Image (tube, grey):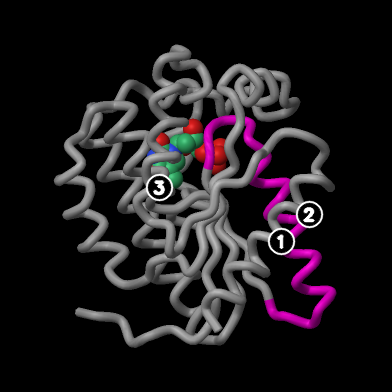
């Protein structure tokens, strides 16, 4: 059933491992809050209790080698919980919703990365996401070696490294997958160079956001 049109503004952060999404999401959140906006920050998977349960099954080191379609379905199931419990209520409340990953990751990791058909992913996305698509998707891009180096050096998340351990060609397909999605969806996607200091990248994101909002006016 179609969901009534939301009133908030939905921003997703996408990109390969170690691209700096989480840091940038927090910087944008702080910026928006300093301007008096109400912000709901979340992550996919993991932004509500049942999505977090599924996240454990999917991204922890010993979480098993799922069949690629099973994996795609579980990520989509986690997203359905997040949409129902967090994202749609927040958008209906007029919030800015910032999500660390969303459905583009599903297309990129499970279709481009693991070989699930793009048609199957599109069907699942139609069913679960329907018209709750992001207003703006920020794709943080950088060479695979830079991102993987940062991800592997990250402290405290060693139990969550299943996807980081896949080979470099997997991550090259992921990078290209995000760039292709951005090229085909210029109305909602911007590619931002993720290299440099967090402050530099944040400044690039703010100018991309301003341009996007100006274009929509
Ligand atoms: P994160 O640590 O950036 O939150 O992402 C968790 C891992 O899950 C990351 O390697 C990307 C992967 N992932 C998928 O494979 N499919 C998906 O649909 C999503 C949202 C994430």
Asked which quadrant contains residue 83, the reply is: bottom left
Residue at coordinates 64% horizontally, 60% vertically from top-left? 208
Q: Is residue 97 left or right of residue 110?
A: right
Tell me where the magenta segment starts and ends, as one range.
Answer: 15-38
Where residue 169 appears, x then y in whole percent? 41, 15
Secondary structure beneath label 2: helix
Mark 2 Cα-neighbour bin, 10 Å: few <14, some 14–19, many ≥20: some
Q: Is residue 81 left or right of residue 197?
A: left
Q: Is residue 85 visible?
A: yes
In the picture of the structure, the residue carrying the numbered disc 3 is 183
Where residue 42 appears, x then y in whole percent? 58, 59
In the picture of the structure, the residue carrying the numbered disc 2 is 203
Q: Is residue 54 visible?
A: no
Residue at coordinates 26% horizontally, 57% vertically from top-left? 125
Secondary structure beneath label 1: helix
In the picture shown, does residue 139 fall above or below 85?
above
Q: Are marks 3 and 2 in contact (CB under 8 Å)?
A: no
Quadrant showing the C terminus: bottom right
Question: Which comes before the other along the chain, label 3 or label 1?
Answer: 3
Q: Are marks 2 and 1 in contact (CB under 8 Å)?
A: yes
Q: Is residue 188 left or right of residue 8?
A: left
In the picture of the structure, the residue carrying the numbered disc 1 is 207
In the picture shown, does residue 15 fall above or below 40?
above
Where residue 176 appears, x then y in whole percent? 42, 31
Q: Is residue 132 left or right of residue 114?
A: right
Mark 1 Cα-neighbour bin, 10 Å: few <14, some 14–19, many ≥20: few
């Amino acid at each position: 059933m179609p969901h009534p049109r939301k009133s908030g503004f939905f921003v997703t952060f996408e990109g390969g491992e170690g691209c700096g999404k989480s840091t940038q999401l927090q910087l944008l959140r702080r910026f928006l809050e300093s301007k008096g906006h109400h912000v709901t920050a979340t992550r996919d998977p993991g932004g509500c209790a049942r999505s977090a349960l599924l996240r454990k099954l999917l991204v922890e080191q010993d979480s098993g080698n799922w069949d690629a379609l099973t994996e795609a379905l579980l990520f989509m199931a986690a997203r359905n919980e997040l949409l129902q419990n967090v994202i749609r209520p927040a958008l209906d409340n007029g919030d800015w919703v910032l999500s660390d990953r969303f459905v583009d990751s599903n297309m990129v990791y499970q279709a481009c990365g693991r070989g699930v058909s793009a048609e199957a992913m599109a069907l699942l996305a139609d069913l679960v996401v329907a018209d709750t698509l992001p207003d703006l998707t920020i794709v943080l891009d950088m060479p695979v070696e830079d991102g993987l180096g940062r991800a592997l050096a990250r402290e405290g998340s060693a139990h969550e490294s299943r996807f980081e351990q896949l080979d470099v060609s997997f991550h090259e397909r992921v990078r290209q997958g995000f760039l292709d999605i951005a090229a085909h969806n210029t109305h909602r996607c911007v590619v931002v160079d993720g290299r440099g200091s967090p402050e530099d990248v944040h400044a690039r994101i703010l100018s991309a956001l301003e341009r996007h909002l100006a274009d929509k006016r």
